[in-house]
Image: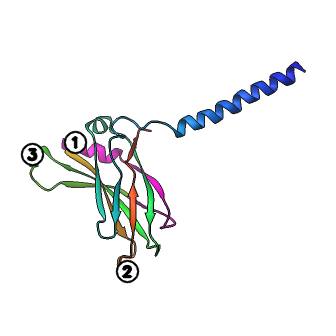
Amino acid sequence: MCRLIHGFLVGGVLVGSLFLGGVCAQGKRPESGQEQAASVELTNSHPKSSFAVSADVLARSPSVVALSFTRVVNPARTAFAIFVYLSYRPPEAADAAPLKILVGNGSLYPADRPGGFLLRVSAAFGKLKAAKATDVRLVLEMRRIHSAEPWSQVEVTAAPPQWRSQ
């Protein structure tokens, strides 16, 4: 009888720790420099927006950026992609137009539902360090997949990026 009770207790503790571990992982606080940014909105009439990249994030050089799109209004289900760039200014050309490094792109499927994707940013951060970049921004640009078709109403809200090291 004692072994049976001991088995239930050990099993209960294991299940409880797995459950609580999952809850804690989901409620994880963002890394430093992430909580200050506000969400941005991309629309068919204003398809570009950006987030500032903090000096702390630049110093850490994360390997991955996680992008979440929390709200999507797309009644016609227009197929679109989100292109992601890191823009910067080299120190010797601080007054010039910013330069861009393509990080990658992704799309939401179905095109009318929230979602997200991960992109590897280690190579881009290596280029930023080599260029001694300043005024670094993460730029999001929404483009129609079928560029010959006209835009319909599309609105996408992007949550602040989550920078991760793996």
Q: Position of residue 31 (x, y in %)?
A: 39, 36
Q: Residues within 10 Å of mark 2 (few under 14, many from 20)?
A: few
Question: Which label is found at residue 130?
Answer: 1
Q: Secondary structure at mark 3?
A: helix
Residue 150 lies in the magenta-colored region? no
Q: Residues within 10 Å of mark 1 (few under 14, many from 20)?
A: few
95 vs 123, nearest the viewer: 95
Q: Quadrant of the C terminus?
A: top left
Give the distance between the C-alpha atoms of the residues marked 1 and 2, in whole angstroms: 40 Å
Q: Residues within 10 Å of mark 3 (few under 14, many from 20)?
A: few
Q: Secondary structure at mark 1?
A: helix
Q: Position of residue 16 (x, y in %)?
A: 68, 31
Give the mark nearer the N terminus: 1 vs 3: 3
Question: Which label is found at residue 149?
Answer: 2
Q: Amino acid at mark 1?
A: Ala
Q: Secondary structure at mark 2?
A: loop
104 vs 142, nearest the viewer: 142
Q: For marks 1 and 2, give the one nearer the viewer.
A: 2
Find the magenta span and give its range.
Answer: 106-133
Give the distance between the C-alpha atoms of the residues marked 1 and 3, in whole angstroms: 13 Å
For residue 108, side relative to residue 155 (left or right): right
Give the mark nearer the N terminus: 1 vs 2: 1
Question: Which label is found at residue 92?
Answer: 3
119 vs 4, nearest the viewer: 4
Count of all numbered marks drawn on residues in the image = 3
Q: Quadrant of the N terminus?
A: top right
Q: Position of residue 47 (x, y in %)?
A: 31, 65
Quarter of image, res 148? bottom left
Q: For marks 3 and 2, give the one nearer the viewer.
A: 2
| Marks 1,2: beta carbons within 8 A | no
